[in-house]
Amino acid sequence: MKNTLKILGLITIIMVSSLLIFATKSVPHAKENKKTDTDTNTSETYQIRALKIPTNLEFAKERVPIEKADIKERIDRELLVNTYWQSNGLLLFKRAHKYFPIIEPILEKNGIPDDFKYLAVIESGLQNVTSPAGAKGFWQIMKSTAKENGLEVNNNVDERYHLEKATQVACDYLNAAKERFGNWTMAAAAYNAGNAGISRRINAQKVDNYYDLLLVSETSRYLPRIVAVKEILSNPNKYGFIFDKEDLYALEATKTIKVDTAITDIAVFSKGLGINYKILKTHNPWLRENKLNNKSRKLYEIKIPTEL
């Protein structure tokens, strides 16, 4: 019996050794398993190409000096980020088609170059967002700035969310900044850093050109980002964005009703107009609660869909 067990043990050892030798020969070593040029983890048609920076870039008819190495790199960065963040880029095309027709005529009426509509794009993505600092709406207006320029801002009504009124405030600010600093590029930078902030840096650094100023990262990227978004949204096919007109968002036709009294329940008020609470608040995001206090009997204009 013992001899039989010894023999079986030897046979088992031999079989295990043979399997180990076979396994070792069958599995390539790590250094032999390196990728070849034909291996890929993406579609064979997927490519990420370096972008050629246009030589004729400008903002508000003011030339971008891309012959300066740092400016070229900053523009390149923003073109890359906004070209290859494809989902966000496509959403910008869709929203621009919806909201630019509201913004453009207000800019024109106030003598603001059309390129400033791209400032709204980079500020908010054309959405009613709130920044960590408390700026709100498409134009990211601070509470103090809004009140100084005649907008109503409280828990009940916040007209920073009123696109037409907020665009007018942005125009007033930009015109004043242009008057102060002498050109539109500096006016745009001041929209980000503030008039006082830009003035301090001009005085400290003894230059008066945005592209010569050493600025904090956010303001340093500000104009290149606007220029990059303008370039991409103006040339969709050039940057690989393919869509049909029907893919874009469209603004629903509305009519205006005037109200100079309080509304105790906006949901009930909406029902009386033949719509619901969501529809009324969607068209009037400046209404912040389910009521309109209106103790001063101010005249408000409320938008509702034309076709009910």
Image (cartoon, grey):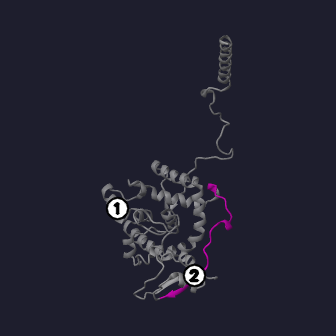
Horizontal side, residue 205 vs residue 125: left or right: left
Q: Residues within 10 Å of mark 2 (few under 14, many from 20)?
A: many
What stretch of residues is rendered in magenta? 238-259
- Residue 304: mark in rendering: 2
Type of amino acid at the residue the image marks with label 1: Gly
Q: Residues within 10 Å of mark 1 (few under 14, many from 20)?
A: few
- Which residue is drawn at the image coordinates 53% and 57% (left, top)? 228
Pick the residue in front: 130 or 289: 289
- Which residue is drawn at the image coordinates 46% and 77% (left, top)? 289
Instruction: Give the residue pinned by disc 1.
Output: 197
In this picture, is 28 found above or below 192? Answer: above
Q: Are marks 1 and 2 in contact (CB under 8 Å)?
A: no
Q: Position of residue 71 (x, y in %)?
A: 47, 52
Name the image quarter holding the C terminus.
Answer: bottom right
Pick the residue in front: 165 or 39: 39
In this picture, is 49 found above or below 62? Answer: above
